[in-house]
């Protein structure tokens, strides 16, 4: 790890803001799903493709963009990707039909994948080694902050005006963040250009293999169910649509608490931090159709769900830093897996919801959480430098 003499915390904040806006952009359609479906005259499953499209595009841009740009300074790369985000958001706001809207989401996906691939490994280059866990927690706090602020506020803005205003506001904030990245980031030439062969080499590490597979299972399961949280809260818990935005705000608040707790705990116990994620998600999502049938119980389960999923990014990235031969290449693979899983999960969930019911989608998600739990349990904790006590 290269030595950093002076911490660059404003640079860390700029990267966090980028992550915040990108995750907000990717997940904002979840809160606006019913509104967009009605506006465009399509089913909720079809509208769910607004999550699938950028997820799939981001998955492939994550490993391929670092390879394609070669020795391009990462400061330039991150700034340009936020500009692409601006264009994608503005075009989304102007979309006249579902086809145009999905096409504009391709640009959003391009920026998400490339940005995340670099952002996940950038903390050691901005702060001294002893402060890397703190910087990681702050950067990936952008994921939880997107849930607690970005998606709920975007949903509320869409409820008070319309969904186009929400996407337009996202474009304006992305432009400001692009300027912040350019001003606050130092020059960041790549230490070693990422090659396609280097991506494949990461799988020689069992730790990386397990992290990739567990991430896929957890994220596919989560988005197969959570993409449809608005109809879940309305149809299962009996909550009015006008309250969904506020509840997503509470969900995100729980996610921030989960991120902070995981940032502290995963630095010492990465194995246990990762293990608890699929275990608790399995319990929460599996029982939701039975126990979440009142507004009070539905909200309680949603809060636990938010706290646990809010811990995913920092827990998995800490595991990766402990086990990966090359952190930027491994992080690119993780971004590929995470975003492809978002898109795949939303698509699978949409098919199940349109073909069967919301509870069936939640039980299918629970099956994936069970597989993730079993995989971590059969993995020796010593691969991340942790011993069972």
Image (cartoon, rainbow, N blue to C red):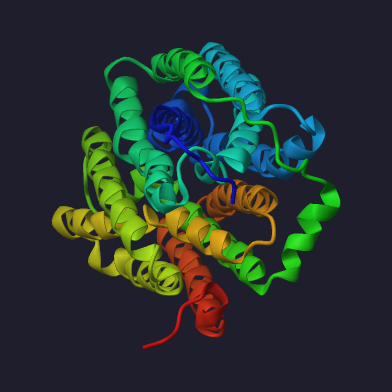
343 or 87: nearer the viewer = 87
Q: Is 382 rendered above or below residue 28? A: below
Question: Could you say where residue 16 lies in the image, as x and y percent from the top left?
Answer: 43, 34
Question: Could you say where residue 345 lies in the image, as x and y percent from the top left?
Answer: 56, 53
**Residue that appears at 46% across and 78% down:** 386
375 or 225: nearer the viewer = 375
**Residue that appears at 43% across and 41% down:** 139
**Residue that appears at 77% across and 54% down:** 199
Does residue 94 appear anywhere in the picture? yes
**Residue that appears at 42% across and 42% down:** 143
339 or 37: nearer the viewer = 339
Q: Is 324 rendered above or below residue 100? A: below
Q: Is 389 rendered above or below residue 173? A: below
Question: Could you say where residue 241 lies in the image, as x and y percent from the top left?
Answer: 26, 36
Does residue 102 appear anywhere in the picture? no
Q: Is residue 58 left or right of residue 180?
A: right
Q: Is residue 88 left or right of residue 284?
A: right
Outermost residue on the bottom side: it is 389
The quadrant in which residue 258 appears is bottom left
- Number of disc labels: 0
Q: Is residue 80 left or right of residue 295?
A: right
The quadrant in which residue 55 appears is top right
Query: Which quadrant holds the C terminus?
Result: bottom left
């Amino acid at each position: 790890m290269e030595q950093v003499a002076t911490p660059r915390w404003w640079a860390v904040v700029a990267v966090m803001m980028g992550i915040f806006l990108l995750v907000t952009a990717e997940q904002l359609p979840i809160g606006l799903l019913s509104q967009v479906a009605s506006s465009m005259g399509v089913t909720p499953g079809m509208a769910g493709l607004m999550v699938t499209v950028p997820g799939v595009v981001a998955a492939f841009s994550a490993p391929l963009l670092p390879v394609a740009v070669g020795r391009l300074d990462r400061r330039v790369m991150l700034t340009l990707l936020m500009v692409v985000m601006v264009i994608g958001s503005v075009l989304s706001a102007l979309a006249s039909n579902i086809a145009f809207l999905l096409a504009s989401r391709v640009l959003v996906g391009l920026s998400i994948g490339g940005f995340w691939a670099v952002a996940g490994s950038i903390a050691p280059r901005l702060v001294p080694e002893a402060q890397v866990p703190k910087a990681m927690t702050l950067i990936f706090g952008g994921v939880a902050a997107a849930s607690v602020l970005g998606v709920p506020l975007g949903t509320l803005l869409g409820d008070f005006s319309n969904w186009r205003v929400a996407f337009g506001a996202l474009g304006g904030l992305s432009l400001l963040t692009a300027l912040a990245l350019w001003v606050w980031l130092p020059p960041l030439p790549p230490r070693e250009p990422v090659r396609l062969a280097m991506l494949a080499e990461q799988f020689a590490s069992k730790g990386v293999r397990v992290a990739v597979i567990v991430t896929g299972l957890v994220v596919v399961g989560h988005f197969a169910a959570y993409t449809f949280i608005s109809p879940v809260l309305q149809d299962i818990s009996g909550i009015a649509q006008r309250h969904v935005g506020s509840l997503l705000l509470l969900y995100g608040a729980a996610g921030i608490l989960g991120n902070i707790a995981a940032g502290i705990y995963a630095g010492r116990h990465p194995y246990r931090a990762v293990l608890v994620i699929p275990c608790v998600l399995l319990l929460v999502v599996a029982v939701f159709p039975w126990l979440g049938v009142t507004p009070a119980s539905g909200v309680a389960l949603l809060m636990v769900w938010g706290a646990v999923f809010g811990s995913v990014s920092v827990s998995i990235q800490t595991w990766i830093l402990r086990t990966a031969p090359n952190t930027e290449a491994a992080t690119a693979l993780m971004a590929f897996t995470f975003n492809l899983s978002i898109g795949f999960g939303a698509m699978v969930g949409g098919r199940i919801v349109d073909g069967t019911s919301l509870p069936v989608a939640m039980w299918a998600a629970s099956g994936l959480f069970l597989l993730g739990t079993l995989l971590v349990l059969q993995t020796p904790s010593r691969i991340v430098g942790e011993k069972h006590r």
